[in-house]
């Protein structure tokens, strides 16, 4: 079983000791999420008017950029939402209250993500050898950084682009856009959190390469299959028929895959050098 260091002494941990330790790590992580969610819940105006509905507002930075591009380049059209007409509706008597709680929990989870990851690392760390600990230093910071970049990319680039297209799209002028609030929230969440998770690809490849499960040859030979798999995964998390979102999300993932190959090559070379 794994060993932990307590007051410079090592002692064996039994199965139930591991379970008890994991329970406390999970409890502390859950408390952190609830505290962050409570703080987000109290900031109702900022949470909804600026954060949640920000990408649908004409003064959102990305939307302002779209309008500027459309005004200065004639070949760009349909991106500016200044003249878009739509209304968000709620049909459930408890809808807005439950939505408030739901969004506070989502935001709390994102804010507390670094701490949750750190608690997980604290649980796993005692089972690692000194060399493994050295090789994984900074894992919490890098994983958090990749997740944050992914979420920001989804929030500031993919979400406004998708909303601009879907909100303004009309099959016929007879039908007016009255958008269910749950539909909008679902799209916004789909464009942020899953994208943040997809951006963890380099870290996943690094860990698998360190464990000897993945090699550069495997990644290079399986590139075509991986690209198809990425497209399928992205197609699942993007709205049906939204080709623009599919391309916007999959393109940076393709770049991350190529970057991951380089990471895998470096890890493999370092391991070969250490063996000799």
Image (cartoon, grey):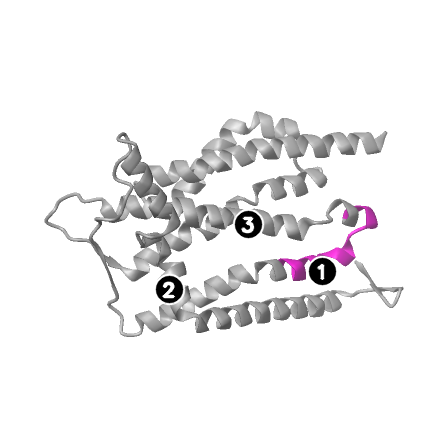
Q: Does the stretch in magenta take in 156?
A: no
Q: What is the C-alpha distance between the residues marked 3 and 2?
A: 22 Å
Q: Nearer the viewer, mark 1 or mark 2?
A: 2
Q: Position of residue 135 (x, y in %)?
A: 76, 44
**What residue do we see at 60% from left, 35% from top?**
260
Labels 3 & 2 near each other (Cβ < 8 A):
no
Secondary structure, mark 1, is helix
Asked which quadrant contains residue 121, the reply is bottom right
Magenta stretch: give its range. Answer: 117-132
**Marker disc for residue 122:** 1
Q: Main secondary structure of the magenta part?
A: helix
Q: CA distance from mark 1 to mark 3?
A: 19 Å
The image shows residue 243, relative to residue 100, as above or below, that is: above
| Mark closer to the chain start, 1 or 3 | 1
Numbered disc in front, either 1 or 3: 3
Relative to 80, say whether 272 is above or below: above
Pointer 3: what residue? 147
- Give the residue pinned by disc 2: 48
């Amino acid at each position: 079983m794994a060993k932990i260091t307590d007051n410079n002494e090592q002692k064996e941990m039994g199965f139930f000791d591991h379970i008890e330790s994991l329970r406390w790590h999970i409890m502390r992580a859950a408390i952190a999420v609830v505290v962050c969610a409570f703080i987000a819940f109290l900031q109702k105006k900022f949470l909804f008017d600026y954060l949640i509905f920000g990408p649908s507002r004409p003064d959102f930075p990305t939307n302002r950029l779209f309008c500027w591009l459309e005004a200065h380049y004639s070949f760009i059209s349909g991106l500016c939402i200044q003249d878009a007409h739509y209304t968000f509706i709620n049909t459930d008597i408890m809808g807005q209250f439950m939505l408030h709680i739901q969004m506070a929990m989502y935001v709390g989870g994102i804010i507390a993500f670094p701490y949750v990851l750190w608690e997980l690392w604290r649980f796993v760390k005692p089972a690692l050898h000194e060399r493994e600990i050295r090789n994984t230093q900074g894992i919490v910071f890098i994983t958090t950084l990749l997740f944050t970049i992914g979420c920001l990319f989804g929030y500031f680039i993919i979400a406004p682009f998708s909303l601009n297209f879907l909100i303004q799209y009309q099959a016929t002028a007879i039908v007016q856009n009255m958008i269910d609030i749950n539909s909008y929230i679902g799209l916004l969440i789909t464009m942020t959190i899953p994208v943040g998770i997809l951006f963890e690809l380099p870290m996943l490849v690094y860990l698998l390469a360190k464990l000897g499960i993945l090699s550069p040859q495997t990644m290079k030979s399986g590139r075509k299959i991986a690209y198809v798999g990425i497209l399928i995964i992205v197609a699942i998390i993007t709205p049906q028929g939204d080709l623009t979102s599919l391309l916007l999300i999959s393109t940076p993932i393709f770049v991350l895959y190529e970057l991951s190959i380089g990471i895998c090559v470096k890890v493999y070379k370092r391991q070969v050098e250490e063996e000799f």
